[in-house]
Every structure is written in C-alpha cells, then in structure tokens.
Amino acid sequence: MGKKIFFGACAVLAAICVCGFIISQTNGTYYYAQVDNSKIKQDGMRDGVVDFNGDMKYSYTLLSYNDNGKDKEITFGTSRKLRDDAFICLTVKPFRGVIAWKEVQYDELPDAVKNQYSAVK
C-alpha cells in the first residue's frame, strides 16, 4: 500500500510540474486598453496585496479588449503614471496576470478593438 501512495504522489507532482511548464511557455494573450488616469491608485498595496518588488507604485484597472473585441476588466501595476488616453497592449498569462505592457498607436490596434473605441467616440 505504501508504494501505491508514493507512486501516486509522484504522478501528481509530475503532472503539476508539466502543467506549470506548459503554462510558463505560452506567449500569453494580448489585450488592448486606453489609459484613463482617473482609474489609477497610488499606494504600497495593490488590491490588498503588498507589492514586495517596491517598484510598482501605481495600479490601473482598465476595461480591455482581446484581438476579437471581447472585453475584460484588467488590473495591473506600473512603476510610473502612464500617458493619459494612450493606447496600450497588455500581455496577460494565465495565473500570472499582466506580465508586460507597451504603448501602441491607434493604427496598430486590431480591427475588432478599433471598432470598440470608434463606437465610443
């Protein structure tokens, strides 16, 4: 009976490691948002979680759109205030959240995302 438990535990641990490796290797999903500095928070906490890196002074929660135009509210941290009304591309990974962001031009947005912003204007 002891060997069955040992091998079962090893199999579960191996499955967890494989899943973790697969998730870490994905490129992530891209979401696009327009910066709204009225949605910024500045403090040492991000949604109740202490930022141990110390460099993420600002937290944004923005309505964002994937390549197909599907919306999702996303919260992420930055070390500085972003340019108000700028468009940004967020790279989001499962379980990790936003791992990177960069400013993009309106012309670089996918057509489905442009449609979301042109409907607002």
Image: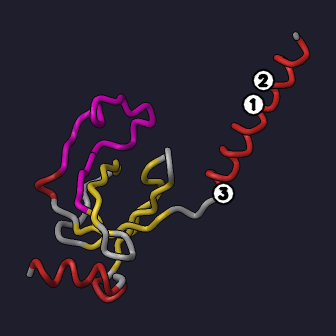
Q: Nearer the viewer, mark 1 or mark 3?
A: 1
For the point 78% across and 36% down, which residue is it? 14
In the structure shown, which secondary structural element does the residue marked by tag 3 occupy? helix
Q: Is residue 9 above or below residue 107?
A: above
**First in sequence: mark 3 vs mark 2:** 2
Report the Cα–Cα distance between label 1 and label 3: 19 Å
Task: Give the residue at x 35% y 72%.
Answer: 103
Q: Nearer the viewer, residue 79 or 14?
A: 14
The quadrant of the rendering that contains the C terminus is bottom left
**Type of amino acid under label 1:** Leu
Residue range (magenta): 40-63
- Between residues 113 and 50, which one lies in front from this camera angle? 113
> SS at mark 2?
helix
Q: Amino acid at mark 3?
A: Gln
Relative height, residue 107 to residue 27 (above, below): below
> Which residue type carries mark 2?
Ala
- Circle 1 residues within 10 Å: few <14, some 14–19, many ≥20: few
The image's mark for residue 13 is 1
